Amino acid sequence: MIFRTVFFASTILTSSLLYAQEGPAATQAIVGVETKSFQPLSPQNIKIKVNNRDAEISVIAPVKPNGTQVALLMDDGLRDSIGRQFSDIQGFIRALPDGVEVLIGYMQNGRVVSGKGFTTDHAAAAQDLRLPMGPAGISASPYFCLSDFLKHWPGGSGSEGSLTVPKARFVMMLTNGVDPYNGSVSPLNQNSVYVDNAIRDAQQAGVTVSSIYYGNSGVRGGAASFSGQSYLAEVADETGGHAYFQGTGNPVSLSPFFDQFRKSIAESFVATFSASSRNNQLADVKFSTSLHSTKLVAPRKVRPGTRVTPLAEDQQGIGGR
């Protein structure tokens, strides 16, 4: 299944009006919590600056299992060695809480291909895994694939908006992160317009993007490892996700990374606040908390008017809190 969503003219018009508005609009963003001793976020212990000005958070609610989608995107250029990690990947999928929708997709030729799409049948999704095709560069660029997937999110609105409020959406990419269309992988050439576009598309859509670096794909070597890891870390930092890697080699096991990723989802909240667009630009946001020894992970920019989940103050979180 190649994902392409056909938008009705009224839907596109609604999206355009939302993005073009200059006044304040109710806006949502996913905020993750990193701490050894978990404490829930509340309007009393979290603050936000929008475009460097203090703003008020009206609602801060944990994500709930039946309001969450997780897309696992694998680079179709990975070598057969990834097959040794299938038990770890399948274990992650099966361990997702009931109600979470999961998708297994393969990045190839600038888009994402999947057999089943999103499903709450985790056992079936785990069986949907296959070995990647393997040819170097078959993804074209993982950032082409990510942008296209975000714009045509299956069963949802993508970055172009929809009358239907989406679920909290998380992406995990398994790739070496190298952008072959940016030329040299030299440390002196780490500004990629394609990476920037993917970041902007994720921020507009309100999607958190994480990744696991797996180097056995396409361009390899020290410079390529540095380049790919740098890009993946940049995408994660800008969208509120996490970039996982173990040195410049492939991890012995993916389970520790998937455990951290699943924990980060379980300890994520949806913050609702007011934001305004300046000259049709994304709004800068910065979250902080008064909780001791607690770090917040969130996107650095949002599109005013973005909805992540339906407004609700009594949502039950994935972590059962």
Image: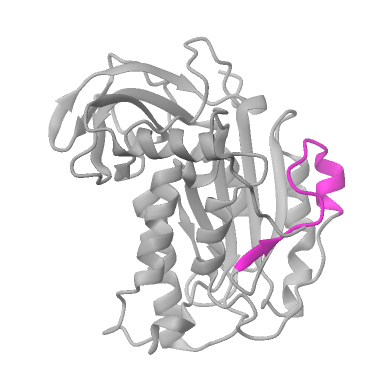
Of all residues shown, which one is farthest toward the left? 53
Spot occupied by residue 212 in the image (x, y as percentages of width and height):
55, 62
Q: Quadrant of the N terminus?
A: bottom right
Name the residue rendered at 49%, 51% in the picture.
209
> In the image, what residue occupies the spot 15% across and 26% down?
54
Please tell me which residue lies in front, 119 or 201.
Answer: 201
Q: Is 239 above or below relative to 320?
A: below
Total marks shown come to 0
Assign the C terminus to one quadrant of the image: top right
Image side of residue 259 versus residue 203, left or right: right
Residue nearest the viewer, comparing 190 with 92: 190
In this picture, residue 296 sits left or right of residue 213:
left
Residue found at x 53% / y 52%: 151
Outermost residue toward the front in this view: 9
Give left or right: position of 28 versus 167. Answer: left
Magenta stretch containing residue 112, yes or no?
A: yes
**Quadrant in the picture for residue 70:** top right
Residue range corresponding to the magenta coloring? 111-127
- Position above or below: 36 against 315: below
Q: Residue furthest top?
A: 314
Instruction: Inspect the magenta stretch and tell me whether residue 168 lies in it.
Output: no
Residue 105 shown left or right of residue 244 in the figure: right
Residue 219 in the image, given as x and y percentages of width and height: 54, 87
Whole-percent x, y for residue 217 in the image = 62, 81
Color theme of the render? one colour
Measuring 49% from the left and 40% from the top, which residue is drawn there? Answer: 12
Q: Quadrant of residue 176?
A: bottom right
Give residue 35's position: percent from left, percent from top.
40, 35
